[in-house]
Amino acid sequence: MDEETFNLSIRKFLKTVGVGSQREIEQAAAKAIAAGTITGVESLAATMTLQIPALQLNVAFDGEVRLQ
């Protein structure tokens, strides 16, 4: 295993996940506010799950997304 290639690949994947996740959360929040489902001052529980079946990896990360 080439450690440098491995680490760069992980970082690239996590950057893609981070950027894509942020966009999805922003769009979902805007849609929910427009629909009146949320008011825009909430703190929302969030869970991100990382799965790599070949490594038998399945890890959940819990957190909070605050809108204000």
Image (cartoon, rainbow, N blue to C red):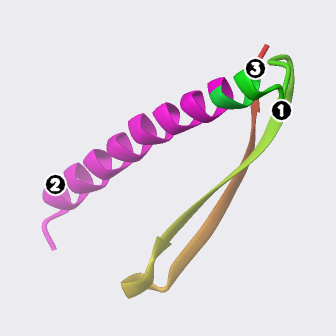
Relative placement, left or right, of 68 versus 55 is right
What's the amino acid at mark 3?
A: Leu
For the residues marked 1 and 2, what is the alpha-carbon distance in whole angstroms?
A: 45 Å
Q: Secondary structure at mark 3?
A: loop
Secondary structure, magenta segment, majority class: helix
x, y percentage for residue 12? 26, 46
Query: In the rendered image, is residue 6 in sight?
Result: yes
Q: Earlier in the sequence, mark 3 or mark 1?
A: 1
| On screen, residue 39 above or below 48 | above
What's the amino acid at mark 2?
A: Glu
Labels 1 & 2 near each other (Cβ < 8 A): no
Q: Quadrant of residue 31?
A: top right
Relative placement, left or right, of 51 versus 1 is right
Report the residue that reaches farthest toward the top. Answer: 68
Q: Which residue is mark 1?
A: 37
User: Which region shows up in magenta?
Assistant: 1-30
Please identify, in this view, whether the residue under mark 3 or under mark 1 is nearer the observer.
1
Say if the magenta span includes residue 13: yes
Q: Give me the residue at 86% from left, 25% from top.
A: 42
